[in-house]
Each structure stands twice: as structure tokens, then as C-alpha cells.
Image: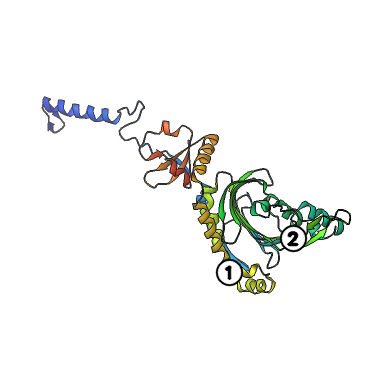
Amino acid sequence: MKIGKFNISKKNLIVIGTVVVFVIGCIFIVNKGGNKSLFYNPDKNIKIVKSEASKIELEDYQTNEFSIKKPKGWKVDTIGDYIHYTIRVYNPDNPIYQFFFNMKSEGYNKSEDAKRWQQKYYPNDMFAKTSVIATKDTLGFYKIFNDLGTLNNTAAFTFPTLTDFTVSENLGKGSLGGDMLRATFKDANGKEGEGIFTAYVYDVGTYYVSENIISGKQIDIQYLNVYDTIFITTPKDEFIDWEDILNTICSSLNFTDTFINGFNKQQDAVMKNFQQIRAIGNEISDGIMDSWNKRNTSFDIMSQKQSDATLGYERVYDTETNEIYKAYNGFNDEYDGERYKAVTDDMYLKKTSGYIEK
């Protein structure tokens, strides 16, 4: 048979036709019951959206008193003199993402009896207004933390709200003296949050007075001070994704010579025991990281699984990059590629890089 300039035998024509049919058949071969060709790429249409934590860019922030790194768009508020200095770094759109540091707050009562005595005899004094920390420990302080805002909020500075403060795990003593607590809470808008908290409650001593002439009951009215109130928080079940960013903010806190000079003039006997106040952020950060690494990881695994189930996610990881994603419910049943696999339990302890959307 002659086709154009070529003479093709009938036998060769049959072979060519067979090859063409085979190639066409391969192109349109059915894959796993779907209409997917030989050249189908299961990863081509995967839609990944980065998590907010993955988008964060840090920038330097500096005042005459200190320097710190903060995420772009976040605010930094301060209040207080040198020994009561307070810093809050937070997301103004969602303030539950935050780093909080207070050098010292003071004048807390040891008992309700002591407060009643102060209110009876010195109703206008600070001690008649400050709260009671009956347990004299870190948890006891955070139970009454909201009173700091009641007494000290200004137009320029708002103390965070920590309502329903509940400890999920005591991670032990921190290097600055207080317990390191992992806890949940609700903010001013009722939104659930979680974080790591510490504070050192110091008993100044004892000073007994008589309740009244008749009873003769002795009441210790000497006060308590609280040093190094520090915490980092996020919305509930997001702390794993943000811990390294918040800890970086914490570790970057560095006080200037101006601050150190002013602090040295005002410091009290307890503060003299604090070494390296200039770079206290590093000490705080090391304590948080050490405590975080010692936590009960089974709690995190269970909590993350519950969160995924509630929000309708399936967690997967990218076998090429090892990044972890929260995929839409049903993804593992629909996806027929090899790149994305269901996570193992230990992967729930790692931060997620984003979401796979349908």
C-alpha cells in the first residue's frame, strides 16, 4: 500500500495500527475506577493554605528601656516604673496571641481576715483593695490575676483577662522561683486560650495584730509580693504551632543601660538575687523551653486529635518536605497519590504548616 511517498506493506500497516490503538488506550486507561489518564497527577490540584504562624515575620522593636523582636503588625504596650515594669506584646486583632512580662506587683493579702482588717482600719490604703493569695503560690496568684487589671488598667494599657484559669499540668519550678504551669483560660471575650505561665510569690514576713480587743485573735497582716509574672498564650489547641515564635519573642527581650541604671536604684532585696537582669529574656525562654520539653505529650496527642475531630480535619504530612497539614475531612479517602500520608501519633506533637482545602 502506498501512503504519500511511502510504500507500506499490509503487515506493517497492521503493526502501526495496533501500536496507535495501544497508545490511545494507555492514555485513556481507567485508574482506580475514575476517568484518570496515564498522565494524571494526583498532587496537581492540591490546594494548600499557609497557617497564620507560618506567615509570621519578626521585626526589631526598641525603646529607651528595652529591645525585643515582635511579629509584624503586633503591638507593644508598657506600663510601670523600673521595678514594676510591665510589657505586653500581642496581636491587636486577636490579643489572645501574646507575650506578657511583669517585673513586680505587690501588696497582696495572705488571708481574708487580713483584708477585712485592712478594710476596717485603713479603708483607703492599697492593702484594703488588693486580693488575697491564701495559698501563697503561682496558681493562687493566677486565680486572682484579673484583679491586676481592675486596679491598674489605663487608657494606654490593658492587662490581659485570665478567667476560669485551670492548670492542666504543673511543669515544675522555674529558674526564677515560681512554678511553671501549663493552663487553659478564657479571655475578656470568652474565647478559650492556653499557654505557659509562671510567677514567684514571695512572703515578706510576718506582722501580727489583734483582730479586736474582745476576741484577741491574731492576724498576720504582712503582705505578699509577686515577682516575674510571665506568660505566653494562644487560642486553645494552637500553642504547638506558636510556641517557637512566642519563645523567640521572649528570648529576645533585652534591657538597655538606661533601664538597668534605673532598676538598680529602685530594686529591693529580692531583686538583688536576680542575675543578668539585662538579658532576663534568655533565662525566661530557657525555662519555658525546658518545661515544654518535659510536658506530658500524651495530653497533647489526645487534645490535638479531639480538636481535629471537632473542627473536621484529618492530619497528613508531606513525604517530600515533612511538613504537616490539616486536611479537610475525607481527604485520605479521596486522595490516591503517594505524596501525602496520614500522620503517626508522634507527629501530633509537631506544628502544622497550613491547611489542605477542598
Which residue does the numbered mark 1 point to in the structure image?
275
Specify the amino acid type for callout 2. Answer: Tyr
- Residue 352: horizontal and vertical position, in percent? 48, 46
Amino acid at pointer 1: Gln
Identify the image quadrant of residue 210: bottom right
Horizontal placement of 231 versus 106: left or right?
left
Q: In this view, does 223 lie to the left or right of 328?
A: right
Residue 166 point in image, percent of width and height: 63, 45
The residue depicted at 54 percent of the width and 36 percent of the height is 311
Q: Visible in this render: residue 99?
A: no
Q: Which of 88 and 39 is in front in this view?
A: 88
Which label was assigned to residue 185?
A: none
Q: Where is residue 109 in the image (x, y as percent from the top left)?
A: 75, 56
> Could you classify mark 2 by the number of other residues whose Cα lies within 10 Å: few (under 14), some (14-19), or many (20 or more)?
many
Quadrant of res 344: top left
Q: Mark 2 points at which residue?
A: 223
Say whether disc 1 or disc 2 marks the residue closer to the N-terminus: 2
186 and 78: which one is in front? Answer: 186
Q: Quadrant of the N terminus?
A: top left
Kind of element beneath mark 2? loop
Vertical relation: 185 (above or below) 335 = below
Position in image of residue 99 (x %, y %)? 60, 56
Q: Is mark 1 on a helix, strand or loop?
A: loop
Tag 1: Cα neighbours inside 10 Å, few (<14), some, or many (≥20)? few
Q: Nearer the viewer, residue 137 or 198?
A: 137
x 68%, y 74%: residue: 265
